Image (cartoon, helix red, strand yellow):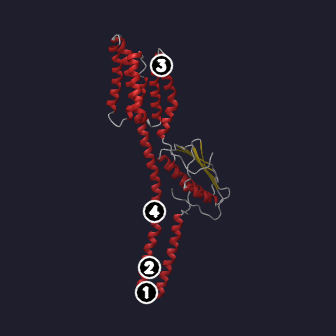
Amino acid sequence: MPEISDHSEVQPQARLRRLNLVMMLPAVVIGGLVAVAVDAHSWGQGAILGLGVVAGVVAFERWTAGQLQRVAPACLLVAAAVWVYGALMAGSTTAFFGIMMVGTLMVPELPRHRALAATGLVAFVAATGLARAMVTPDALSDVLLPYVVLPAGIVAVVAGLMFPNKRFYDVVADLEVARAREAELAVARERIRFASDLHDIQGHTLHVVKLKIALAQKLLHSDIGRVESELREVYTLVGDTINQTKDLAHAQRRLNLSAELENAKNLFEAAGIRVDVDRESVEIDARAGEWLGQVLRETTTNILRHAQATHVRISLSESGIIIVNDGAQETQLPELRGLAALRERVAGNCGEMTVTQGHGKFRTAASFPRAPADTVPSSGRAR
C-alpha cells in the first residue's frame, strides 16, 4: 500500500448510492429488456420502446451519482413519449417502465410540492392508458386493467416507496452533519484545554510580576538591595514561564496511555464509531507509553476530522500501537502536518511510525524497540 499521511472523506450518501447502483442496475436493465422483448412486435417497435428503458437506466445511474437534475427533463420527456407511443400505437402494456423509473426518481428530489407531483405522475400514466379506449376499437373493459389500473397502480406504489427512501437519505445526511460537528467539537475541546493551560501558566506569572514590580517601585529609593532581589525573582519567574510556555506550545508534557485510550474510545463512540481494543497483558514501558499515547491522540483527532470511519481497531503491545480505521478512499491524499511532524519526532527518539492506506482502510502504526532514554514525547495539538 502507498505510504501517505491522511484520511479520506467519502460521503456515506455517495457510498449508499453506489451500492444501489451495483445491486439494482442489473435488475433494472434486465427488467426493461424483458419488457421490451415481450411487447415489441417488430424491430422498430423494439427500438422505440427501448428508448424508454434507456431513459430509465440513465436517470437511475445519474441518481446514484447525485446528478439526476442534469438529465431529468430530457429523460422524463423521452419516457413520457414512449409511454404515449406504447399505449396508443404499439399496444404495449409495459411501455410505462421508463416513466415509472424517471418519474419516481424525480418526484422525491423536488424541493416542494412533491405530493402534487406524484399525483400528477400517476394521473398522467392513468390518463394515457385510458386514452387508448378513445383512439382504438378496444373495449373500455379491455383497456382498464392492463393500460390503466396496473400501470398507474405500480407507479403509485413505487413512488410511495421512494418517499421513505428519500427520508432515509436525509437521515443519513443529518447523521453525517452531526458526526462532523462532534469531530469539530472534539478539536475545540482540545483547543480550550490548551488555552486553559496557557492561562494557568501565564496568568499567575503576570499577576506575580505585576505585584513584584509595584513593590520594587515603592522600594526604589529606600531599599535598593530589596529592589535588586525582587527584580532577580521577576527575571527568574519570567524565564521559568517562558520555558513552561515553550513546553506547552510543543506539548512536551507526559501523557498517560490508559487515559488517552479511554479518551479516544469516548470520542469515537460519541461520533458513532465502533471501537475494538486489543491489548496484550504485558507491562508497557513508561516512556514508550508516553509516545504511544501521543500517537493515539494525534491519530484520533485525524480520524474524527478527516475520515468517514464506522469502525476503528486499536492494538497495543509492550512497545507498539496499531490503529486501523475504515472509510479511506483509494486515491492518495496530501500529507497532514500533524502526522508528518509526529513521525519525525518519533523517528528522532528511537522509534518508528508508519501510515499506510489501501482497500478502504487507513493504518497508523508506531513502535519503540528501544525506549527513549532522555526524551519526553510531544503531545501535539490537533491539526
The part of the image, by quadrant, that contains residue 373 is bottom right
Say which label, 4 or 3, has the lower sequence index: 3
Query: Which residue is labeled 2 in the image?
Result: 212
Query: Which residue is labeled 4 in the image?
Result: 195
Give the CA separation, mark 4 to mark 3: 72 Å
Image quadrant where one finds the N terminus: top right
- Residue at screen point 46% across, 60% down: 193
Label 2 vs label 4, nearer the camera:
4
Crowding around mark 3 (Cα neighbors within 10 Å: few <14, some 14 to 19, many 20+) is some
As drawn, the label of residue 220 is 1
Say which label, 1 or 4, has the lower sequence index: 4
Of residue 84 and residue 108, the one placed in the foreground of this image is 84
Say which label, 3 or 2, has the lower sequence index: 3
Q: Amino acid at mark 2?
A: Lys
CB atoms at circles 3 and 1 under 8 Å apart?
A: no
CB atoms at circles 1 and 4 under 8 Å apart?
A: no
Label 3 vs label 2, nearer the camera:
3
Of residue 374 and residue 38, the one placed in the foreground of this image is 38
Query: Which residue is labeled 3 in the image?
Result: 46
